[in-house]
Image: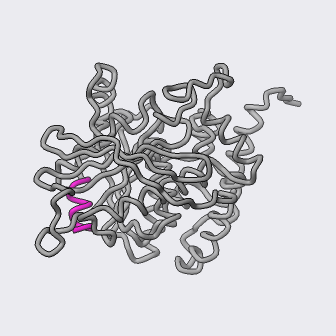
């Protein structure tokens, strides 16, 4: 008789054997499946924090590489604020916008991934060698590049990242020791019946609400995109807020038994209690249907291996076909590492937001 004393092995085997209760299959009628699955899936997020008045304050305004950029601070929930960066396209001056004659612009929320700097390199901060390295390595400044392409882009840090990382300025809290703030904040949240996801989604929605009040923003043309952990946030943002009419998920496609249980390649900001009991990651992405979705997968991605990533994508593809929306699903399969492919993004958002 074979015995096992490894809890890690136990979870790996349990995950491989598990069949999600609300998994989509080819015999399922899409509208009935989505109606049956979406509510319990969203319920795994737990409670959402109360909404608050934003009390916005413009902190700085500058020009960078032809773009007009603004830095705001606003209240996004009880006892918490976030810094918000907004990038405006070249030739677009929000301070002199004429509603009678100037064209309103589509806006894209840009969620950052894990890393030392949160939203900064995503929105074009290339002021240090380490941020320039991140941008070069992951094609990471999509918030800057998409503004260069004519969109308004905006971003905040999720809790535990960037300026909202308690180990960084201006917080300087170190009671975590060597433990990951993503996981600690998730534990705090679940003790209160929430999740990091529900908190971050609420804060992201507050940012979107405020951006919609700025001059020249067309709130009927909103998109969302994100890399890695930002792909997690882009996915959930679309499910949480139907104002977003086009979505790009970059390098966040795989199978939970593989990247999650086997590789331990996830953290507290990406999970919700009982989620895999209900659906796979492919099912979760498929719940976006029939809205337009672009998925980026790196052939050489060492975080989300291409084999599992493509199996996840094929599941999404089956759901989009069942929804009669296969023309709204696109794949950017690029010969690169864990990064923004960027080969189809401008055309995709041009098609669906303009």
Query: Which of the colour schemes (rainbow, by chain, secondary structure, one colour) is used?
Result: one colour
Q: Nearer the viewer, residue 244 or 21?
A: 244
Q: Which residues are magenta?
A: 345-354
Give the quarter of the figure containing the C terminus: bottom left
Q: Is residue 25 magenta?
A: no
Give the quarter of the figure containing the N terminus: top right
Q: Is residue 350 magenta?
A: yes
The residue lying at 17 percent from left, 63 percent from top is 97
Q: Position of residue 219 (x, y in %)?
A: 33, 69
Tell whether 316 sits left or right of 331: right
Residue 216 appears in which quarter of the rendering?
Answer: bottom left
Tell whether 101 sits left or right of 31: left
Q: Residue furthest right?
A: 1
The residue lying at 15 percent from left, 56 percent from top is 92
Q: Position of residue 13 (x, y in %)?
A: 73, 40
Q: Nearer the viewer, residue 287 or 120?
A: 120
Q: Position of residue 133 (x, y in %)?
A: 30, 23
The residue lying at 62 percent from left, 64 percent from top is 42
Residue 273, placed above or below residue 61: below
Q: Nearer the viewer, residue 88 or 227?
A: 88
Residue 310, placed above or below residue 209: above
Residue 297, placed above or below residue 54: above
Magenta: main secondary structure equals helix
Residue 257 appears in which quarter of the rendering?
Answer: top right
Tell whether 209 sits left or right of 154: right
Q: Position of residue 285 (x, y in %)?
A: 49, 59
């Amino acid at each position: 008789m074979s015995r096992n004393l490894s809890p890690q092995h136990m979870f790996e085997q349990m995950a491989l054997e598990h069949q999600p209760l609300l998994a989509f299959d080819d015999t399922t009628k899409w509208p009935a499946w989505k109606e049956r699955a979406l509510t319990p899936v969203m319920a795994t997020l737990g409670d959402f924090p109360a909404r608050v008045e934003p009390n916005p304050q413009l902190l700085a305004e500058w020009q960078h590489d032809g773009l007009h950029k603004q830095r705001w601070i606003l209240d996004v929930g009880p006892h918490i604020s976030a810094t918000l960066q907004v990038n405006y396209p070249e030739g677009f001056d929000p301070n002199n916008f004429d509603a009678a004659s100037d064209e309103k612009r589509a806006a894209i929320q840009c969620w950052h991934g894990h890393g030392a700097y949160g939203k900064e390199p995503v929105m074009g901060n290339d002021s240090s060698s380490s941020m320039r390295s991140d941008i070069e390595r992951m094609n990471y400044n999509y918030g800057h590049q998409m503004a260069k392409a004519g969109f308004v882009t905006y971003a905040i840090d999720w809790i535990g990242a960037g300026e909202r990382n308690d180990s960084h300025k201006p917080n300087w809290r170190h009671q975590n020791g060597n433990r990951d703030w993503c996981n600690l904040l998730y534990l705090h949240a679940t003790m209160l019946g929430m999740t990091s996801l529900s908190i971050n989604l609420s804060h992201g929605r507050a940012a979107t609400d405020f951006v919609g009040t700025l001059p020249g923003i067309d709130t009927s043309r909103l998109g969302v995109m994100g890399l890695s952990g930002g792909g997690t946030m882009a996915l959930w943002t679309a499910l949480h807020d139907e104002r977003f009419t086009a979505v790009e998920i970059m390098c966040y496609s795989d199978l939970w038994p593989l990247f999650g249980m086997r590789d331990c390649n996830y953290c507290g900001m990406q999970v919700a209690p009982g989620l895999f009991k209900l659906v796979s990651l492919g099912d979760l992405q498929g719940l976006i249907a029939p809205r337009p979705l672009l998925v980026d997968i790196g052939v050489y991605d060492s975080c989300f291996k291409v084999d599992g990533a493509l199996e996840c994508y094929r599941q999404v593809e089956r759901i989009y076909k069942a929804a009669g929306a296969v023309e709204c699903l696109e794949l950017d399969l690029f010969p690169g590492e864990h990064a923004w492919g960027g080969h189809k993004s401008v055309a995709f958002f041009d098609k669906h937001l303009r």
